[in-house]
Image (cartoon, rainbow, N blue to C red):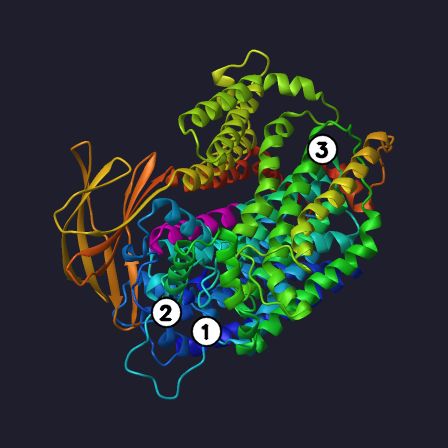
């Protein structure tokens, strides 16, 4: 959390995230712009979408998204346009291209492995014979037991 | 003078810790009771010395001793007293001293209250705990000494970051650290048991309170941090999936898994080696969390170079303890044979599923947090993994957990019938489903998020109530309900807390209303059924800041509700602006108002949010923590505490 605070320190000026003057007149387009903004990273901030960020650069990107939408781009085209210029670093939700499938599949794959191991363990336990109650007490434990019984 | 004494006490504590690491361990191996007994006074001395050092640092902050480097960088003479004190841990050096203070506190508590432990186990636990302290004492003394003096003290300090000057955040780090470090106790017990080569029900009964306490502290710490983010950062976000947040969330998930698996060890003597492994990994994640926060590696890979010494030091500590413990585990795990036998459908199996889901969800968070580094170093791709990824990849596990929770928590030990449990939960299920359907119909056309969240929350909460009621016997009676063991109450309260938090998060995300506009003074506007009017904007002077304060009246259907004062503050010393949102907290919704800049025409930008059920997120977290505390105060643990006294009276003088 402290790191997060640092970012806010770095952000100059008490600007707001989305400014009233940015909002598009067409509510449908604006809604789409907001949705897209939530998935784009503010490049000078830490882990913040341009929708939440107060930085100047985030504002520029928000205006760019709206510009593309007004120009008639689809959501995918607008995103592609921005990724072309700023790199995939701007995407808060990583793509599945290249090695990134490892990221997306890691959770489900681990779940399968864990479920299999858990199933084997439980099956093993359910078929095992009850272990005989072990009567192995150490000397000190016997001594302690004797004391308790005598008390 | 006090500063030098504090520094000296810290060095002494370091030396005591070294002795406490070596002597009891050797004593336990050779069965020399004198050497083993040495651990107890050493643990007490270590704690007192560290407490003195910490007290000296607090004193330096309180009297604003600007000959100390940390005080200059993080304090100011005009700062309110509360924040002078909390400034002690609002910086790297001080927070590490707090960390090690808590390590020694837990060690001392194990020494004071561990009378019933077998002497060899106790000596080994205290030795491992001291070893952890040694590592962190060395870290503080060699890389980040808080007692460093300046040759030429400045006239005044540079002030604490204003965002940190807040009651919510003043107590956020201590709670988190109590949680992180509480897991060090579970770790010490696990390693001691591995050296001992023996894990039994008694061991689990000793580990569980520590884990439970750690989990309670983590819950409170995380909730405080998220609440702070909600009201302080100016747009009401409460969770960002930021690496630093994930760093505290991962130990929380694992601590939750650990305290459930320890139940199986305690009651049924199964899952032993898994529980040991989990205890090691959970503390490992605490160290990873510290590493992430302290090295700054995840801010960006390059920030790591800013302070490589500290990062590498913590990485070495991590490698030594976790690597060492895992090696020991590999060598000794065979000895931990399971004893309990249970069927496929049983409480034990349900707790296995609980552990799988919690551990895998932790793995997902871990993988997502580290993936940007892996991608950059391994594939030369600079990319981000943000909230949309975690929301998509993490949530399914929590949904699955919520679905099975009421069923699993009611299954009997050893062997159960799913049909029977499902039948006793039929009303809870029906009611939850009915609520979800009503909401689904009422909010036509919106996302399924809220109905699903409501269903899960209601299912878990009602399920917990049914579970508690079923404990009173076939007929059920109120007086029996009140006399149930506190552990039963704790379970029900903590589980329903989880349900409430799940519902609140879904409800807030689905039903939030937002409004951004340029507000004209005196001209009312409507947001989500509320009427707001910006009455006026004034400049106000605070103790160490200047404020632009708006006055907003809030009305509904012409009926006055309250007056709100959103602020924009400027801290001249720290040269930094903050926004102070004005929030009207109510049971079912918050109205959240933020004031922005003045426009050229003299009007003001304003953001207004209606946030339904926002308080329920933290209410649920408080219930979770309360459930943990209830369970911790159960008779079982207190009886164990009473039993401790018998050996000292029963053993004749030698």
State the CA–CA distance, disc 1 to disc 2: 10 Å
Is disc 2 on the same chain as disc 1?
yes
Residue shown at 53% from the left, 21% from the top: B428
Where disc 2 sits, the SS reads helix
**Residue B195: which quarter of the image?**
bottom right
Graded by Cα atoms within 10 Å as few (under 14), some (14 to 19) or many (20 or more), the crowding at tag 1 reads: many
Q: What numbered label is drawn on residue B348?
A: 3
Q: What numbered label is drawn on residue B125?
A: none
Q: Nearer the viewer, mark 3 or mark 1?
A: 3
Mark 3 or mark 1, earlier in chain: 1
Q: What numbered label is drawn on residue B59?
A: 2
Q: Is residue B385 above or below residue B211?
A: below
Q: Is residue A44 above or below residue B224?
A: below
Q: Position of residue B103 (x, y in %)?
A: 56, 60
Is disc 1 on the same chain as disc 3?
yes
Residues at circles 1 and 2 in contact by the CB criterion of under 8 Å: yes
Graded by Cα atoms within 10 Å as few (under 14), some (14 to 19) or many (20 or more), the crowding at tag 3 reads: many
Mark 2 or mark 3, earlier in chain: 2
Q: Position of residue A61 (x, y in %)?
A: 41, 63
Residue shown at 23% from the left, 67% from the top: B544
Where disc 3 sits, the SS reads helix
Q: Main secondary structure of the magenta part?
A: helix
Q: What numbered label is drawn on residue B6?
A: 1
Q: Which residues are magenta?
A: B216-238
């Amino acid at each position: 959390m402290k790191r997060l605070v640092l970012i806010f320190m770095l952000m100059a000026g008490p600007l707001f995230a989305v400014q009233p003057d940015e909002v598009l007149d067409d509510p449908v387009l604006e809604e789409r712009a907001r949705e897209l903004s939530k998935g784009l990273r503010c490049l000078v901030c830490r882990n913040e979408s341009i929708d939440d960020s107060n930085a100047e650069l985030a504002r520029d990107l928000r205006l760019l998204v709206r510009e593309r939408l007004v120009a008639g781009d689809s959501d995918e085209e607008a995103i592609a346009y921005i990724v072309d210029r700023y790199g995939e670093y701007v995407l808060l939700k990583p793509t599945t291209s290249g090695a990134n499938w490892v990221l997306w599949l890691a959770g489900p794959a681990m779940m399968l492995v864990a479920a299999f191991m858990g199933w084997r363990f439980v099956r093993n336990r359910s078929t095992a014979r009850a272990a005989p109650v072990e009567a192995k007490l150490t000397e000190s434990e016997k001594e302690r037991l004797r004391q308790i019984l005598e008390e | 003078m006090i500063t030098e004494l504090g520094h000296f006490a810290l060095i002494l504590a370091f030396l005591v810790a070294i002795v406490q690491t070596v002597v009891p361990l050797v004593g336990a191996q050779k069965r020399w009771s004198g050497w083993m007994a040495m651990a107890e006074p050493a643990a007490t001395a270590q704690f007192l010395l560290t407490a003195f050092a910490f007290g000296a640092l607090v004193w330096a902050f309180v009297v604003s001793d600007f000959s100390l480097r940390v005080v200059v960088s993080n304090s100011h003479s005009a700062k309110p007293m509360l924040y002078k004190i909390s400034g002690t841990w609002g910086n790297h050096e001080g927070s590490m001293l707090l960390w090690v203070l808590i390590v020694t506190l837990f060690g001392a508590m194990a020494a004071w209250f561990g009378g019933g432990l077998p002497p060899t186990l106790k000596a080994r636990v205290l030795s491992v705990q001291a070893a952890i302290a040694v590592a962190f004492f060395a870290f503080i003394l060699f890389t980040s000494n808080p007692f460093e003096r300046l040759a030429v003290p400045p006239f005044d300090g540079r002030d604490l970051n204003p965002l940190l000057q807040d009651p919510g955040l003043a107590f956020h780090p201590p709670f988190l650290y109590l949680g992180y470090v509480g897991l060090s106790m579970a770790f010490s017990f696990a390693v001691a048991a591995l050296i001992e080569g023996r894990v039994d029900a008694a061991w689990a009964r000793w580990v569980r309170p520590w884990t439970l306490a750690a989990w309670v502290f983590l819950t409170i710490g995380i909730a405080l941090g998220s609440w702070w983010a909600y009201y302080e950062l100016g747009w009401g976000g409460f969770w960002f999936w930021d690496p630093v947040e994930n760093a505290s969330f991962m130990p929380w998930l694992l601590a939750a898994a650990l305290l459930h698996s320890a139940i199986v060890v305690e009651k049924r003597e199964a899952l032993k080696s898994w529980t040991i492994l989990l205890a090691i990994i959970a503390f490992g994640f605490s160290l990873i969390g510290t590493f992430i926060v302290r090295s700054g590696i995840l801010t960006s890979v390059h920030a790591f170079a800013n302070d490589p010494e500290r990062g590498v030091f913590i990485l070495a500590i991590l490698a030594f303890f976790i690597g060492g413990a895992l090696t020991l585990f590999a060598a000794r795990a065979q000895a931990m044979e399971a004893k309990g036998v249970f069927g496929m459908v049983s409480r034990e199996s349900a707790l296995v599923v609980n552990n799988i889901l919690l551990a895998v969800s932790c793995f997902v968070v871990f993988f997502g947090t580290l993936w940007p580094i892996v991608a950059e170093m391994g594939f030369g791709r600079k990319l981000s993994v943000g909230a949309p990824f975690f929301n998509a990849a993490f949530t399914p596990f929590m949904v699955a957990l919520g679905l099975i929770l009421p069923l699993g928590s009611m299954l009997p030990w050893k062997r159960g019938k799913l049909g029977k449990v499902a039948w006793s939960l039929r009303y809870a299920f029906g009611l939850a489903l009915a609520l979800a359907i009503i909401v689904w119909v009422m909010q036509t056309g919106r996302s399924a998020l809220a109905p699903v969240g409501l269903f899960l929350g209601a299912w878990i909460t009602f399920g917990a109530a049914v579970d508690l009621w079923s404990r009173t016997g076939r007929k059920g009676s109120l007086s029996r309900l009140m006399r149930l063991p506190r552990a039963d109450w704790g379970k029900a309260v903590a589980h329903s807390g989880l349900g409430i938090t799940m519902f609140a998060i879904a409800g807030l995300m689905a039903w939030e209303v937002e409004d951004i506009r340029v507000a004209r003074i005196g001209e009312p506007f409507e947001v989500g059924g509320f009427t707001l009017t910006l009455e006026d904007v004034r400049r106000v002077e605070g103790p160490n800041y200047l404020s632009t304060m708006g006055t907003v009246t809030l009305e509904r259907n012409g009926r006055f509700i309250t007056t709100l004062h959103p602020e924009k503050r400027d801290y001249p010393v720290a040269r930094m602006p903050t926004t102070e949102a004005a929030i009207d907290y109510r049971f079912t919704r918050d109205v959240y108002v933020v004031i922005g800049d003045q426009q050229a025409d003299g009007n003001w930008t304003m953001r207004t949010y209606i946030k339904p059920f926002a308080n329920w997120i933290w209410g649920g977290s408080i219930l979770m923590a309360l459930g943990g505390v209830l369970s911790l105060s159960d008779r079982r643990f207190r009886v164990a505490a009473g039993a401790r006294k018998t050996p000292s009276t029963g053993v004749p003088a030698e």
